[in-house]
Amino acid sequence: MTSKGLFISFEGIDGSGKSTQARRLADHLTANGREVVLTREPGGSPGAEEIRALVLQGEPDRWSAETELLLFTAARRDHLERTIRPALTEGKVVICDRFADSSRMYQGLRGEMRERVDALHDLMIGVEPDLTVLIDMDPSAGLSRAKARATVEERFEDFGISLQEQMREGFLALSREYADRFTVIDGNRDMDAVALDIQAQVEAALA
Ligand code: ADP
Ligand code: TYD
């Protein structure tokens, strides 16, 4: 999608190390003289951060599957308009902790709505990352890492281990569906090993 910048997303199940690795990649690229915008979904712009609180807090059944999809898409549209597109136009590297593939998985699986997720994406978002880093890992280890954080943003973590198992398989299937932009990284290793692997993939994409 970009004429100048590079749009990188991180995907994977809760607790797989996306936020940790996105930050490390941002630090690495900044140290090498790149202009980087580190951002996340849901959120990444003031309006989208307000929607984030609506979708991530409260009871798991707070929203119907359809309403939830609309909220995530509204947040993404605002994030795209106000944060992602302007940064890419200025030639920056945008590193985004989750993007539309998370909707394909979480909202897609929740109400068997993958077709509607894709239709709404095409209608209202219409862009994919240049590179998607999928951190693949054992769901039970991921869930215990995520639970150890103990925040109020637990709506999705409350869905439990069987959903995490489905998510892992679903993300791997997505990586085959969009093989041109996905790179799959083994997240069951120490942080430094994972970070080095990701740096190598990103440097190849930037070259
Ligand atoms: P995510 O953004 O995918 O949910 P985080 O980056 O927030 O994951 O990591 C979840 C927790 O696991 C954090 O407490 C983090 O410090 C820890 N963590 C991240 N990567 C690793 C790793 N490779 N080994 C052990 N712990 C890790
Ligand atoms: P995040 O803060 O990245 O959680 P974690 O660090 O635990 O991975 O995302 C919060 C939750 O939002 C996560 O459980 C996945 C969910 N989510 C969706 O359901 N759809 C989406 O489109 C996005 C971006 C996130």
Image (spheres, grey):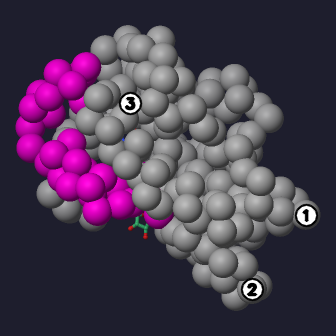
The reply to whether residue 142 is in sight is no
The residue at 39%/60% (across/down) is 44
Within 10 Å of the Cα at label 1, are there few (<14), some (14-19), or many (20+) other Cα atoms? few
The amino acid type found where label 3 is placed reads: Tyr
The amino acid type found where label 1 is placed reads: Ala
Tell me, yes or no, whether the highlighted magenta stretch contains residue 57: yes
The residue at 57%/32% (across/down) is 126
In primary-sequence order, the first of circles 1 and 2 is 2
Q: Which type of secondary structure does the marked residue at label 1 adopt?
A: loop
> What residue range appears in magenta?
39-68
In primary-sequence order, the first of circles 1 and 3 is 3
Position of the C terminus by quadrant: bottom right
Q: Which type of secondary structure does the marked residue at label 3 adopt?
A: helix
Q: Residue 207 carries which label?
A: 1
Q: Is residue 133 left or right of residue 153?
A: right
Q: In this view, does 69 lie to the left or right of 121?
A: left
- The residue tagged 3 is 106
Q: Is residue 18 left or right of residue 67?
A: right
Query: How far apart, in angstroms, are the residues tagged by discs 1 and 2?
Result: 14 Å
Q: Which type of secondary structure does the marked residue at label 2 adopt?
A: loop
- The residue tagged 2 is 33
Q: Are marks 2 and 3 in contact (CB under 8 Å)?
A: no
Query: How far apart, in angstroms, are the residues tagged by discs 1 and 3?
Result: 33 Å
